[in-house]
Image (tube, grey):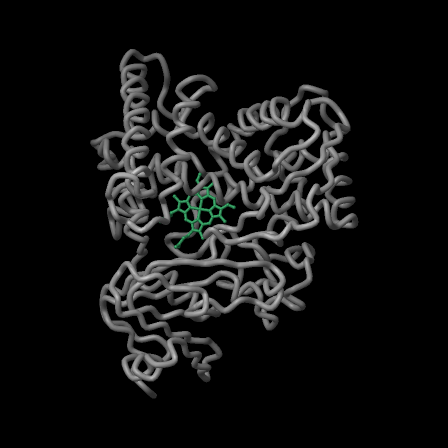
Amino acid sequence: MPTMAQVVRNAYNQRALEEETSNGFNIYMAWHTCGSLELITSSDVFVPSSNQTTESQQLSLFGGPTVFLTGPAANKFIFSSDSLTLKQPQSITRIIGSQNMMELIGADHKRVRGAVSYFLKPEILRKYVGKIDEEIRQHFRTNWLSHQQVKVSPSMKSLTFNVICSTIFGIKQGTTREALVNEFNKMLAGMWAVPINLPFTHFHNSLKAREKVGKILNRIIVEKRSALQRGECSSEDEDLITYLISLGADKGETLTEEEILDNAVLLMIAGHDTTAIVLTFIVRQLANDPIIYASVVNEQEEIAKTKAPEEALTWDDLLKMKYTWRVAQEILRTIPPLFGGFRRVIKDVEFGGYLIPKGWQVFWNTSVTHMDESIFKEPEKFNPLRFKKQSEIPPYCFIAFGAGPRICPGYEFAKTETLVAVHYMVTRFKWSLCCKDDTFVRDPMPSPKQGLPVLIEVKASL
Ligand code: HEM
């Protein structure tokens, strides 16, 4: 069995190598010598699945010596080994902040994740369905109702941002939210930029915007702290920020100001584009697939029939939206918002007979597993029914939300806003795509080239 170093040496000249092992997982090597700023292009490490050859895919990542592992066994290793830790590109860490939970490990990660995830659990989330419903309905009233044409991608981004602002942060519509969204978008523009902080670089502008986002959030924290002290609100029933600042030091749960701030920024980033992408591609799928569209409309109209015109959806209504969620899961399988991510090797570790040295990176990828025909039969076929029996999907095979101790804590939140938004879209509107070219690029998240403009027809009022 060769050591990893031998494999790397072999790979050095050809730049990429695939090793099929008897364990049935694949190892792809990419050897990069220019330090952490080197750009890894798709030809180095990315193996496009067969259905993606028709879609334009552009991918750029930062890296050092990198091992690319795919398949269920590799996913289990990556998501559960304590020899690996999450690694974000430097630009992302500097923009979000060093105390965000993705940078934390061990007990600190557990403490901060435990506190932050509190508001994202079903027991708490079910109380917020009405608030999410109101925010989403308001979005469609303002941005879809009196419009003939809508660009779905920016519309969904604004929808998910507003839902997070109101439900998780308790920021009402108005000037503060507008200022926040403005700076937030500037901040996002440099997230994947080369981290050179010189005037006029994207990264510099992003850092400046992050400072302003921090100031706005700090002001909100101060206001909420004094409202709490004056007894004007109770910690648990308000919003995540109020809850975090009220945590008892006696229980050892306190979060520092910096931890609260950095994790607020993380939630805004992690929970906004991802769900917006799922919604955007659901709209595209429903426009292109009349059979699936009819099934979704049928399920949602049955629920709409039981509601008075202004009555909000409830948690129990969402439980009935089984087919709609299967469509969303199939979107997540075929066009996962996150193509993968890096782990840093913090101590020498063996996998499948190979030694991966400390200091190296491991890269996991969603699509290669999701498009593996030994796991998902006819992987190119869009078939929501493959999610009918969840128990038939083996562990570490559907990894759109990751797995293990860092599995996405926003799963239920994303599911809730997706179902509520699809409900109002299909029961109140009909749409058709404006552009023949509905292909997408990865930037690095999948994004329709033209923003997915659609022509709107109103079916019923909101
Ligand atoms: C469809 C929507 C979403 C998808 C596909 C998604 C995907 C993921 C994935 C794959 C990870 C794991 C990354 C890794 O292990 O390297 C992750 C982590 C995370 N997600 Fe999500 N996510 C979504 C929505 C959300 C939402 C709505 C929130 C919050 C409101 C959120 C908050 C987070 C956080 C805080 C982490 C870091 C967890 C940790 O390091 O412990 N996500 N997400």
Q: Position of residue 206 (x, y in %)?
A: 32, 38
Left or right? Give the position of 152 relative to 342.
right
Q: Position of residue 58 (x, y in %)?
A: 49, 58
Left or right? Give the position of 437 relative to 405.
right
Q: Position of residue 433 (x, y in %)?
A: 71, 42
Left or right? Give the position of 66 relative to 440.
left
Residue displayed at 30% across by 28% down? 212
- Quarter of the image where one finds residue 391: bottom right
- Quarter of the image where one finds residue 429: top right
Camera-side residue: 61 or 378? 61
Quarter of the image that includes the C terminus? top right
Quarter of the image that includes the N terminus? bottom left
Q: Position of residue 19 (x, y in %)?
A: 43, 81
On screen, residue 133 above or below 296: above
Residue displayed at 49% across by 60% down? 366
Q: Residue furthest bottom?
A: 1
